[in-house]
Amino acid sequence: MADDNFPKFSGGSQSNRPSRTVGGDPREVPHPAEGVLPERPTRPGSVAGAMGGSRPPATTSPPTASARQSPRPNARETVTPGKAVPSPGASVPRNESPRSVPPAGVRARQPPEPDGNPNEVLRKLPEAELDTFTELRFQADEAAAELDPELEKAVGFTHFDTASSQDNLITVLMTRGDLHKLPSQTLVRVKSLEDRHSYLGVVVRGPFSEPDAVAANSTIAVGVVVQGKKLSYTFDYHGRAEIEILGEESDDGTLIPPGHRPRPKSPVFLLDDEESEHVLGMKGELCLGMVVGYKQMEARIDALDKSVLPRHTGIIGTTGGGKSTTVATLIHRAQSSGVATIVFDVEGEYTHVDQATDEPAMLAALTRRRQAPEGVKDLHIHHLTGRDTRNRRHKHRHAFALNFSSLSPHAIAEILQMTDAQQERFHKAYEVTKLLLEDLKIFPKTPDEQRQLLELDELSTGYPRMTLQHLLDVVSTYIHVLSTEGRSESKSKTKGTSRQAQLLPGESSEESAAEAAPPQGPQLFSEFKDHLHRVLGRVHEQISRNEVSWRALFGRLLRLRRLKIFDVGAAPGVDYDSMLTPGRVSVIDLSYTDSPQLNNLVIADILRGLQERQEERCQRAQEQDRPIDPALIIIEEAHEFLSASRITQMPVLFEQVALIAKRGRKRWLGLVFVTQLPQHLPNEVLGLLNNFIIHKMTDSTVISRMQKSVGGIDESLWSRVPRLAPGQAIASFSSFKRPLMIAVDPAPVKRLLVD
């Protein structure tokens, strides 16, 4: 019978082969090209004939002349056991084989005489052999009937373990026909019939193709493949894949850590899409894209699941990898799910997401996904007062100013990069300003404000009702007092050398070049101007020295005021309630600030305000026994805001963000950090993240660092990161049973391309 495992040889056209039937009888010998070689013809009188076709020994004498002159038979003749071998020179009748005496106790089996033409190669099987083959067929049918019919659905079987086997990894072998059924990332069930255990696994390596008959690296296998233009045959092959065991299935269907490995030759079955979705945790209305390895499975998350949005996410990848498309798609899906979405947009890239995309490549991708271009329904654009926005014609534009009182004095000192001497004078002026606000009954006024003052934490916020002008008035008064005392003590101390002698440790002579102090006599512009005597009294109570440092501090605060973003009378503050409206997209356009420090000020202030307002909304929701409205905050170019160098310079600012991140998890306030330079993010920031969408990265050093910081992603997925195509990503969410490679959906909204 033919065996598919033997090499397929091409021995010429089919028309040149002898007929396979003899007289129409099905009892026939197969053609030699199908795996059974014909009997080797031998010359009469040769020793090879007596040995069944083997080569004669070297001592065999040559045939006699009479033997050489004997006529050649006109048909192939085979020497079979039971026929004698004639001696050299003996004549052999035509068409008659020599006979030999069989050994004692051995029954000679005579081959049938060929019917018809003696030149025919195919001959009828004798009755005895036919009965034997029939019996074997019946036995095979009976054995097949006793097999488990479920095995017909198996796509492979587990292989034996070797010295190189690894924990939690199992090798699976499959036939050539089932090779296409086990692409990478496919979920499978392994039923270990021997010990009655069932496991769930996922294909993490392969499938690979291996030849059946020889090793893949053998000379003959290499030669067959290399000579593909000349040879029309090849070895049959099978498939090999490695699966990672996700867990053992318990009696109630839950997954538990596996205590054993599947036994060898355990059948492997595919999970259908419905069961795979359940196992992987693909649930919810927020679709990110398609899961690679499945035709119809979508990567979905539940926007109202506590393990998803209240947790924080990192979207990471190099330029051109698809981060912006992922962000735009996430904005659209979150808005459709009724989630309030706030985007800190440093490039103005998302200021037109209320419009449908018009990019040809994106439209083609949407058509392939059977989706339509569509803008978000409720877009509001916020920008700093005095700054422009990239969407000037949008009907919902809101200019806002920051409140100086909302900024922690420690954060202000860090952002302005004050020296130690300047920080000392700044905090002294801040304390004096607080006393004046209390003296003049500006704050606190009521018992409630008194209680608020007791709970004040200046590491996270500033003093209520304090303005930047209040602080400038106090610093101006200090300069006036010191300059008056200096003139009265000695008018000669006006040169740089004398000033240098008065510098405190940490001060620099460059501070003498600070902006000029205000004119003689303190000119006040806040509510303090009507209470000059009170201001002078408080300053004298906490007198200081070194006019140079006070002038340098005054110059830094003046530059802060020139930004015209604090306490601007005509401009309102940030409307946090508007931003937290369910289903609304609020884009904070920072594209015209041209200053990372200013961006950090805005982001830190608005984050703190959103966190405080969300806490109030959560408390009201709990009192009213209703669900909490979730909010999603997306921070573009996060490495500019939370880089390692900035955290070193501004530890207080990072502590604020870390506090917001920790509190936000319990108050449905999720943060999304988007960066193309993950190497600039310190481990403290990565430690805040629970979910990741990782696009293409080519720097092996960065990938290695991310592997150490991001847990749960197996080596097979990390190896794909440098080769990910635009739009592909590794998605790891708390709601997923394991990380997945996905093709992110094209963004249906319009996105401005930036350099």
Image (spheres, grey):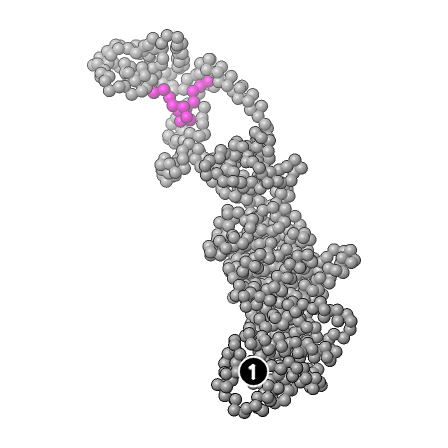
Judge whether residue 23 is colored magenta: no
Which quadrant would residue 233 be assigned to in this image?
Answer: top left
Compare residues 437 and 334 and report the one nearer the observer. Answer: 437
Which quadrant would residue 489 be assigned to in this image?
Answer: bottom right
Q: In the displayed structure, does residue 91 sit left or right of residue 694? A: left
Instruction: Tell me, yes or no, if residue 349 can be seen here.
Output: no
Q: In the displayed structure, does residue 33 sit left or right of residue 62? A: right
Compare residues 46 and 656 and report the one nearer the observer. Answer: 656
Please tell me whether residue 184 is drawn above or below residue 398 in the rendered image. Answer: above
Q: Position of residue 265 (x, y in %)?
A: 52, 31
Q: Name the residue carrying label 1.
A: 546
Q: Position of residue 667 (x, y in %)?
A: 69, 58
Q: Quadrant of the N terminus?
A: top left
Q: How many marks?
A: 1
Q: Position of residue 195 (x, y in %)?
A: 58, 30
Please tell me whether residue 439 is drawn above or below residue 24 in the rendered image. Answer: below
Q: What segment is highlighted magenta in the picture?
A: 27-41
Q: Image point 51% across, 36% down: which residue?
A: 172
